[in-house]
Amino acid sequence: MPLIDMQHLNFAYREHAVLRDVNLQLEVGEHLAVIGGNGCGKTTFGHWLSGRLVQGETGNSSGSLLIDGRPWSAFEPLEHARTVQFVGQLPEQQITGLAATVADEVAFGARNLGLSVVEVDRRVEQVLRACELQALAQANPFELSGGELQRLGIGAAMAMQPKVLILDEPGSNLDPASRQVLINTLRQLRQHTTLVLLDVCVEFALQLATRFAILETGQLHHFAEPDAFLRAADRFGTLTGSPVADVGLALRARNLRAQSASLPTTVAALVSELKDLSDA
Amino acid sequence: MLEVRDLHFAHRGRPALFNALSFVARPGEVLALIGRNGAGKSTLVRLINGLAKPSQGEVLLDGDGLTGLRADQLAGRVATLFQTPEQQIFHDTVEAEVTFGLTHIGLDRTQVRQRVEDALRRTGLLEQGHRHPLDLDHASRRMVAMACLLARKPRVILLDEPQRGLDARMRARMSRLIEEERQRGAIQILICHDMEFVARHADDVLALHETGPVWADALEFFADAERARRIGVGQPLAIELCQELGQPGCLRLDEVLRVWLG
Amino acid sequence: MTRNVLYRQGDSALHRLDPGIKLCLLAWVACSLFVYPWPVLLAADLLLLAWSASLHLGRFVALRLLVMAGPFALALVIIHAGLLPAADRQRLAALPWALHYSPAGLDYALLVASRFVTFLVASLLFVATTHPLALLRSLEALGVAPGVSYLLTSPMLLIEQFSRRSQAIRDSQQTRGMNIEGSWLTRLASLPSLFVPLVTLALSDTSERARILDARGFRHAAPRQQATASRWQAYARRSILAVAVLQAVIKSCL
């Protein structure tokens, strides 16, 4: 039985169809990237996955969503919190406002789970290390930069040790250095944590995901391999392509490389392709 | 021409952020402001748009001193696109929001209407004029803020990460707007962490760093990989490829391919 | 704990005192306002001000007192002692140009002013020495519903974010040509452009923050493995409240 089983989900907001016949099966530990253009419905999709929108309670919807074989309506609040955590786009909205320090913010949710003081402290230390926030443990959350706040929001969610972690455009407000720190942080997720990454940018997806999907005109298109995913992203045209892959696609479009040849995803691979072309 | 002369500034109780900073930006040019977080990029923008005052030095626009004027007094000539458009939205339609900025700069009704329509069309918001700005997604709200700015036809445009969070289509639109404003002769200062976007638009680069600012031609700046790394920025892909392939430096990927592939 | 707009970090006995006890002391002060005459209240004010100075809070308290209570107290005296008609009006001094005043009116004005000042000083000492988070934990230990505790403490925790955002909104609108520093009329005209974004962002934040709190299990917290309020603190709270009630009863009997 898959951890997440979404079947034929349809949802419209005021007669405007946002999700059409969306199907998704996710197993434990999978890392899925869902890429889509601005306003395509990624956040709404994330809200459905996280149980913020619930079948039967939300109008204009049909289909089913089962988490571990049960609908969200069957989950008690604490069990829901242990199962899924959703981190939204705006970093300053991801903190509770009830913590005086970064460490307190991370500990807040874990304390509510009724864990021992020892276990809470252990989780806090682990998360601060993973999120590179140790130096800021005693800082006021409201005085952090955007990148630090984003990591704090994710860290506070990670401290709950959810089965599913959903991140909505986690890199969009970050500079490149902060984005790399975040990628390093997410690479340290527990092995059996399922990650769903919602983003406009394929670069993040390429670094973290094992499965890929594109949300376009309300429909979810699945791709098992990065190559097929990048080609589809290029076809859809609304997505920010990887500059390296874009050059690779341009070479294939001009028949300078075989269409079937894998797209380069690193600068080194691209340089190698260009040098091969020159030698040829 | 925008001229910054011998600017000194320090936040209270902290070491000086700028010491005798000087640079020039000409009409039709795009100057990219780059550097690590905390280097002073946003502060420099505030010194230009009047939200902050330097302790010494001056900012001149076409020979007129700006440093003694308030931000609202400069609004007709200097416009700023902030990262958070929600901080300025207070009307209940997109059209009313774009119109707001024009009521203070002495235009008549016909001119206002024309400018609003033009700004909405250029930003792709013509069909959204009747909608509440907060009903739009984040990227479209950024375009609303951009429309407000474009309608004023300012001499100087200060853009704080305009491309952040935009998909390819919106990014292309933002790029197009920047190039259109270049054609109009606006002076544009672009705070940007995305070196591909910088490579696409910047003529010059002003890199802020604790060891001192570096003001240089964009191509010349990025050609020095070590300096870029020290300042905490990456190199655009085109420059990286040129260096790997042993080609003369170039900021445009299509140009790199054209030269390499003949 | 870190600094808050109202809270001032320190290690005094008052800082360390349980917030629940401090709340009861504040309640006792509130009851005392209607028990004691104004000379006693003013003497208490002087003692409280001296105490705040010893806690390095003298400037914090005095400035706010001056701004919040000064004009109010002055208005009270002018109106009740100087302007309102009264049967006991007399000259202030044996001089032809001396003003007339009402001793009863002055007495009343001083009573109301001293009540306001006393409660204000006590409240300022409370917020300056009690971090909102400590108050929240204390209320939780007392069994107050999490939602109620949040309502009481979150405004204090969020005030700093609010004021920063307010400044950012002012900056945005100024760069669009809005003059927010001119005449009263100009400032009044600029209010919607400052107020509306502040409210809409606050509402958006509130909605998201409620979701985050739910996601962190806030109102459904499992029993915590932390110390609940101690027995002596419970006795102290009950004793203080008993004294407050007793003095009110005695006053009413006299």
Image: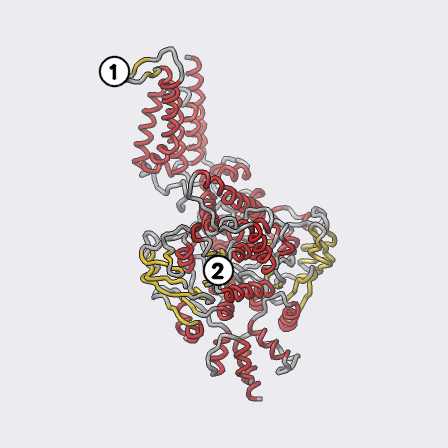
Pick whichever, B205 or A126, lies toward us: B205
Quadrant into which the C terminus of chain B falls = bottom right
Cα–Cα gap, marks 2 and 1: 70 Å
Choose top left, top right, bottom left or bottom right for residue A224: bottom right
User: In the rendered view, would you say B41 is above or below C1?
Assistant: below
Pick whichever, B95 or C245, lies toward us: B95
Residue furthest out toward the left? C95
Pointer 1 residue? C95
Q: Secondary structure at mark 1?
A: loop
Q: Residue at x 55, y 59 (%)?
A: A170
Residue B229 position within the rendered picture, expressed as x and y whole percent measured from the top left? 42, 71
User: In the rendered view, would you say C175 is above or below A268?
Assistant: above
Q: Amino acid at mark 1?
A: Leu
Q: Secondary structure at mark 2?
A: strand
Query: Can residue A89 be seen in the rendering of this structure?
Result: no
Q: Is residue B219 left or right of residue A218?
A: left
Pointer 2 residue? B159
Residue furthest out toward the bottom? A280
**Residue at mark 1: chain:** C
How many discs appear?
2
Quadrant into which the N terminus of chain B falls = bottom left
